[in-house]
Image (spheres, helix red, strand yellow):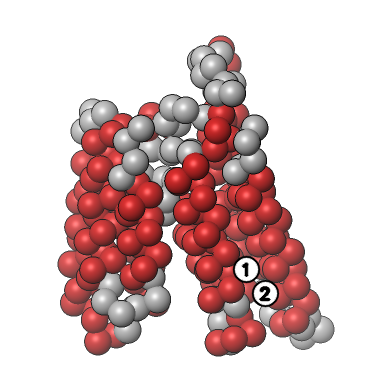
Amino acid sequence: MPVPQLTPPGNLDQHSLLVALTPVLLCLIAALALWVIGVRPGRSQRALRILAAMNLLGALILQALFLLPWGPAAAYTEPLAGGLVRVGWLETGSAFALGCWAAWYWRPWRDGSTTTRWCLRVALALALPVVAVPALAIAAFADVRATEGRRCWLAAALAVIVTGVILVAPLPPACCWWLHAVTLGGCAVLAGRGPWGIPLAIAAIAALRFW
């Protein structure tokens, strides 16, 4: 049953926003912690990978719990943070699917990448379908081939301009999410055959929900 969304005093309504972004924040905190710890003599890569995997697993489990019939996906019926954050079956389900993809595809024991980047990529995958800030897509272009650099610059400029419009102009949430979806779709095309092309397209489709 949907939860009545009132605005209580003392900014207590921000609790819903923190809940919605908790999986993303867990990944970001893990990335920060792993960056601070670093690789030093006496600290093995394996231990850092285990620590990162435990944090990412916790974030993905929490994201999956959002999909329970009594979870946030069913309870939160209105956009949060002035319309920039949205939780629902399509958004939350897409975030969970993309988070699982990123956690498996970017596993550091496959390509030797750092655990910090592993956590950041999962955080990006979790955020794209639920946060209407197209500039987040710029982070995906770090994994695009150098031969497609010109198109990446074009997509980055597009994402920055649209993000500025969303954050500055007093647009209704539906319009913000439409712009977010169109921008992510354009970034997916401009990303070419890079690994983020399909995830960006999935996030764009999830952002097109208006109900």
In this rendering, is residue 66 above or below 172?
below
Quadrant that contains the N terminus = top right
Q: Is residue 96 left or right of residue 201?
A: right
Q: Which amino acid does label 2 sit on?
A: Gly
Q: In this view, does 85 lie to the left or right of 43?
A: left
Q: Which amino acid does label 1 sit on?
A: Trp
Q: Position of residue 170 (x, y in %)?
A: 23, 28
Q: Can residue 145 be seen at all in this image of the molecule?
A: yes
Q: Position of residue 186 (x, y in %)?
A: 22, 61
Q: Where is residue 103 in the image (x, y as percent from the top left)?
A: 58, 69
Q: Can residue 11 be seen at all in this image of the molecule?
A: no
Of 75 and 82, nearer the camera is 75
Q: Looking at this rendering, what residue extends furthest in the top direction?
A: 9
Quadrant that contains the C terminus = top left
Give the numbered dot on residue 171: none
Determine whether label 2 and label 1 are within 8 Å by CB.
yes
Residue shown at the point (69%, 61%) measured from the top left: 57
**Residue at which label 1 appears:** 35
Q: Where is residue 79 in the image (x, y as percent from the top left)?
A: 42, 31
**Residue at which label 2 appears:** 38
Residue shown at the point (56%, 51%) measured from the top left: 24
Residue shown at the point (53%, 68%) measured from the top left: 101
